[in-house]
Amino acid sequence: MADVSKDQVLDRLRTVRGPDMEGNIVDLGMVSDVFISDGKVYFSITVPAERAKELDPMRAAAERVVRDIPGVKAAMVALTADKKAGAASQPVSRPAPQASAAHSHAGHAHAPAGGPAPRAKIGIPGVGAIVAVASGKGGVGKSTTAVNLALALKANGLRVGILDADIYGPSMPRLLKISGRPQQIENRIIKPMENYGIKVMSMGFLVDEEVAMIWRGPMIQSALMQMLREVAWGELDVLVVDMPPGTGDAQLTMAQQVPLAGAVIVSTPQDLALIDARKGLNMFNKVEVPVLGIIENMSYFIAPDTGNRYDIFGHGGARKEAERIGVPFLGEVPLTMDIRETSDAGTPVVVSNPEGAAAKTYREIATRMWEGLKARQAAGGRTAPAIVFE
């Protein structure tokens, strides 16, 4: 079968309409340089930052039409507000400015001046540190990072559990290839599921995958606390919490009611992801949860055929953000199909290819995070759980 060409990809992308159904994304200059390697296609689409969420269906349509090209094995497409090589110089039209919300959820994290002091946070017996993995926005690889980070901590010799706190989109059953229902033992305590040597609890074990969750805030809070406190975790050095994206009820519940040792923020290099990552940082700062560091996911791409490096979605944005706000930069995770494919198959790269470069990167990040956490504890910081963001 003939190799796929950039011209083929661009011709197909001309069938994708631009914002407000005007023109197409190629002729509007929204498409970055297209990179093709081994039948896999990578590119980004430039959009106004304030319209990113609204225009995500356009990104999905672009990914879909490229995947349908004969000879294309996979496509990876991202939205960005940062112009990339190959994009035209004229920006797409922007809508009229919209008034921003007066207050975010995080803005209500503190008690009013003169109000009662916050309640003491109750830890989990036997659990040394709780590490929550979260992201400012979806689509940055939060759960993939969380599961590989947990497995890397295990590979580094720690006793590890993982709590899937994404009530609406639980992914741990699939990522860790676990099926079935957990058993209930004495006093309504649930025995966690287990695979690859780590204990796991997820709403995905309790609710069928096709069932739509329509719970409101109080129900989410109750479910999270049950999965956290009514599970027989046993003796763990660290409990990793895979947080849902954003800064809503689940995140605030964890930050306000659980003694978190810190938060790790996961972001891609894209400016749009960094904008949302800052919201997560601000939320944790307001509820006085220390930030242990930032991880840059999808940081760069190494072509398997030539060994050349490509910064398809930009590079270094998360490192610069970490330096700007004065928190540790934990490392760069490359953009590889292996990481995504092994995670989707339920055999994350840390266990399926433990001697590979990606697994080594995750173990190094896990080491930096853990050493930072222990140093903070030794310096008098809190001794409870931690959180990770993408």
Image: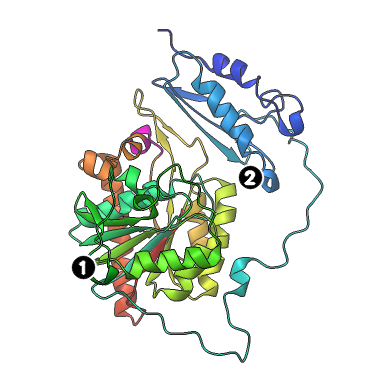
Q: Earlier in the sequence, mark 2 or mark 1?
A: 2
Name the residue at 64% across, 44% down: 52
Percent of width and height locating residue 321: 52, 57
Q: Quadrant of residue 356?
A: top left
**Could you tell whether 310 is left or right of 86 in the image?**
left
Main SS, magenta region, reads helix
Percent of width and height locating residue 62: 58, 27
Mark 1, secondary structure of its residue: loop
Which residues are drawn in magenta?
335-340
The crowd level at tag 1 (other Cα within 10 Å; few <14, some 14-19, many 20+) is some
Name the residue at 59% across, 28% down: 61
Percent of width and height locating residue 176: 29, 45
Name the residue at 40% across, 50% down: 207
Residue 332 visible in the displayed image = no
Q: Quadrant of the N terminus?
A: top left
In the rendered view, tell whether residue 38 sits above or below residue 357.
above
